Image (cartoon, grey):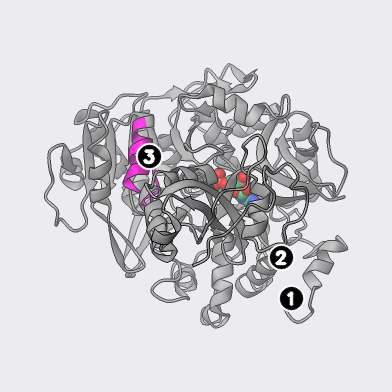
Amino acid sequence: MDSKNKSGSIETVIKENRSFPPSAPFTEKAWIHDQADFDKIWNTSQENPVHFWEQQASHLEWAEKWKTVHHWNEPFSQWFVGGKLNVASNCLDRHLEARGNKNALIWEGEDGSVRKFTYQDLHKEVCKLANALENKFNLKPGDTAAIYMPLVPEAVIAMLACARIGVAHSIVFAGFSSHSLRDRIQDAECKVVLTSDIGYRRGQVLDLQKTVREATSQCQSVRATLVFRRENKTELIENEWDWSQLTSHQSPNHRPSFFDSEHPLFFLYTSGTTGKPKGIVHSSGGYLTGVATTAKWIFDLKENDIYWCTADIGWITGHSYVVYGILANGATSVIYEGAPMHPHPGRIWELIDKHKVTILYTAPTAIRSFMRAGNEYPLKYELSSLRLLGSVGEPINPEAWMWYYEMIGKKRCPIVDTWWQTETGAILISPIPGVTTLKPGSATRPFPGIIADIVNEEGKSCAPNEGGYLVIKHPWPSMLRTIHKDPERFKEQYWSKFKGMYFTGDGAHKDENGYFWIKGRVDDVINVSGHRLGTMEIESALVSHPRVAEAAVVGRPDELKGQGIVAFVTPRDSKDKLDIKTLAQELKTHVANEIGALARPDEIKFTKTLPKTRSGKIMRRLLKDLAAGKQITGDTTTLENPGIVELIES
Ligand code: WTA
């Protein structure tokens, strides 16, 4: 099928609601392959999700079995209550006998250097670090540690070492600024920071240690920083420790303790609708059950797979599907430090051939960039090892889906378009390769044990093809437990819009086959290149600049990144003093310094005032239309002064 020449052919497929491809084209038998069996599992799980999840939890290794499967004190959920386990030993020790010599991690750097860790190797390193954290820094179960690292094996070792000793990790993506890092360390009261002196990206050297120093100088809770030194250039200062030196004296054995199923495994800060990111709290037993089960079923993980998820461990995708879900299944996880199109646009395809990757999981923005770079790059490589492709983080447009399917998967590999969130912990809506008929652009149907629906403003189920809000109607094991230090916000944000339902913040519709089509956020969160950003967070950064009086930030459609960031700013400067080109640059850099480069606005529009309703609320809809270059239509009569968006031109 040629998606480009027959114009609108993809749209036709969708409009006519014909399935494409007719069935999941698996060349080998998928782990789940019997349609009737699967339908039975799915139907039963919809009636009794708790039973389904109990069966899944039993595949993990528990030191003590739970007494109650699910305890629900709306909206606070507990799963496998009374059960005890160690998440790290589920990811490592459990596999040592059967697959100790199998690769757990394959790392490649931008310069082509490779490091491989078998399950045995990884276990050893994790034990050494766990011993160091306990003996040297006196970390105890219930403490928290921050991880601010590039995508190197030591980052994974850091996560598992924390998990092993019951210390909750809080990973901060190494592209975030020192301010963002400081705020997150302070909120989680981290006692130790694990970092690296430098990271590499697009041939550039990133000075991470400097960022950490700036951040920790304002964090009273931090006792020590452990630095994985790659250059050995910078002298260590007080309270900084050399990772390799410290761990080299530690025993490679560590006897794990077992923690309650509800013991917090990690905090992960994510953007919401207010200026301050929320610390999403995830549990141990429920989280691991969710990620291990979905990884196995959705990625069809088998013993010989080489699985590569391109996400950084700084995001939830990295937590769940680079580390925990994959290692819990004893699979091989590939990690690559650097940009997938550097040093040449075919780098990602080169890596797939080199490591014989069988499963690739990446984001639509990346797929669109590969597509834009040109077919000549993937065509240079064989890509014959691939058998399954995944997509995550934002809606995938059918054109990108078709390109991925034809050019990368050679019409041989099913695509699993997986919908989920930082809060959900694990994938909730996705095809199951081997049984689900795919439709380009749809994440298809809820995973077994997940009760999802589309509801209208009154909370009533929508009719087929009627747009509404995506909600989850029954708790699931890997759901967030709360927002750190803010249970009220947790209730308000997710459980107050519709009674008894988890509100996702996404708009969507279901078609007549019960397939879900996710449109995107309905709140003030935007999705830029698959990264979640709060518009209010960027506004706070802008108004912290002395020359800004007021600011409003909106997303606008962007062909490559999904959404771009547009800021409307009212400057303090009088018109004659104002040089808007210079100020725009200054403000873009200011936002990057305050939050991180990923929040840098694409465009800044200066206005004399911001359009507001009589009650003083900024008219975001109007700004969104303006940002997208649309004619301003609709009701603006509630505006205090309609037509007030007077742009200041250069
Ligand atoms: C969006 C990333 C459409 C959605 C795992 C969600 C998607 C937000 C998909 C969560 C998908 C994620 N199709 N939209 N397959 N996957 N999203 O927390 O808007 O970084 O609410 O988690 O990404 O982003 P987060």
Q: Nearer the viewer, residue 281 or 31?
A: 281
- Who comes first in sequence, dot 1 or dot 2? 1
Q: Where 602 falls versus 258 (above or below)?
A: below
Q: Is the CB–ligand 1 distance for label 3 below 8 Å?
A: no
The location of residue 380, given as percent across then percent down, is 51, 82
Amino acid identity at mark 1: Ser
Quick one: SS at disc 2? Answer: helix
How far apart are the alpha carbons under marks 1 and 2? Answer: 9 Å
The residue beneath circle 3 is 160
| Residue 580 located within the stretch drawn in magenta | no
Residue depicted at 42% across the width and 76% down the height: 344
Q: Nearer the viewer, residue 614 or 332?
A: 614
User: Between tags 2 and 3, which lies in front?
Assistant: 2
Q: Is the CB–ligand 1 distance for label 2 below 8 Å?
A: no
Q: Magenta span covers which residues?
A: 170-186
How packed mark 1 is, by other alpha carbons closer than 10 Å (few <14, some 14-19, many 20 or more), is some
Q: Are marks 1 and 2 in contact (CB under 8 Å)?
A: yes
How far apart are the alpha carbons under marks 2 and 3? Answer: 38 Å
Residue depicted at 67% across the width and 37% down the height: 614
Q: Quadrant of the N terminus?
A: bottom right
Q: Where 480 falls versus 515 (above or below)?
A: above
The location of residue 388, given as percent across then percent down, is 61, 61
Q: Where 319 falls versus 201 (above or below)?
A: above
Quarter of the figure with residue 185: top left
- Per the rendering, the mark at residue 398 is 2
Amino acid identity at mark 3: Leu
The location of residue 194, given as percent across then percent down, is 28, 42
The residue beneath circle 1 is 3
How packed mark 2 is, by other alpha carbons closer than 10 Å (few <14, some 14-19, many 20 or more), is some
Q: Are marks 2 and 3 in contact (CB under 8 Å)?
A: no
Whether residue 51 sits left or right of residue 195 in the image: it is: right
